[in-house]
Amino acid sequence: FFLAVPTLVGASVLKFQDAVPYLTNENATLLAAGWLMSFFIGVVAIKGFIRIVSTRGFTGFGVYRILFAILAVAAFYKP
């Protein structure tokens, strides 16, 4: 996870450079609000995940991911 952070920051900077000419005060305000909300929701989600894993372990998470993968493959599989 932590190894992906520099890559994500770099990609965000490149995308932001492309968007700068189109930013207005209203767009910048909406962009800042969206960034702040996604940051806080991400922090809450990570804290919740860490709390669940520290109390219950990875078994439930592993089972959930395997079942979800099976459902996703079944839903999108076209012979």
Image (cartoon, grey):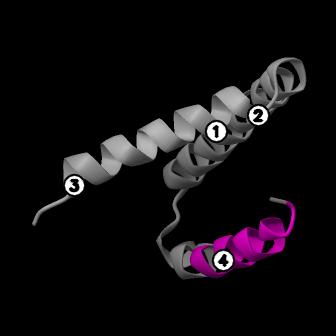
Looking at the image, is mark 2 or mark 3 earlier in the sequence? 2
Q: In this view, does 69 lie above or below 21?
A: above
Amino acid at the residue labelled 3: Phe
Amino acid at the residue labelled 2: Phe
Between circles 1 and 3, the one closer to the viewer is 1
Residue at the disc numbered 4: 11
Residue at the disc numbered 3: 76
User: Dividing the picture into quarters, in which one does residue 10 lie?
Assistant: bottom right
Amino acid at the residue labelled 4: Ala
Measured Cα–Cα span from mark 1 to mark 3: 21 Å
Left or right placement of residue 65 versus residue 79 in this view: right
Figure quadrant of the N terminus: bottom right
Farthest residue to the top: give it: 55
Measured Cα–Cα span from mark 1 to mark 4: 30 Å
> Disc 4 on helix, strand or loop?
helix
Which label was assigned to residue 62? 1
Looking at the image, is mark 1 or mark 4 earlier in the sequence? 4
Which label was assigned to residue 58? 2
Which residue is painted at 79% across and 21% down in the image? 52
Residue 7 percent across, percent down from the top left: 75, 76
Q: Is 26 or 49 nearer to us in this picture?
A: 49
Residue 50 percent across, percent down from the top left: 84, 30
Which segment did they paint magenta? 2-15
Between circles 2 and 3, the one closer to the viewer is 2
Farthest residue to the left: give it: 79
Disc 1 to disc 2: CB gap under 8 Å? yes
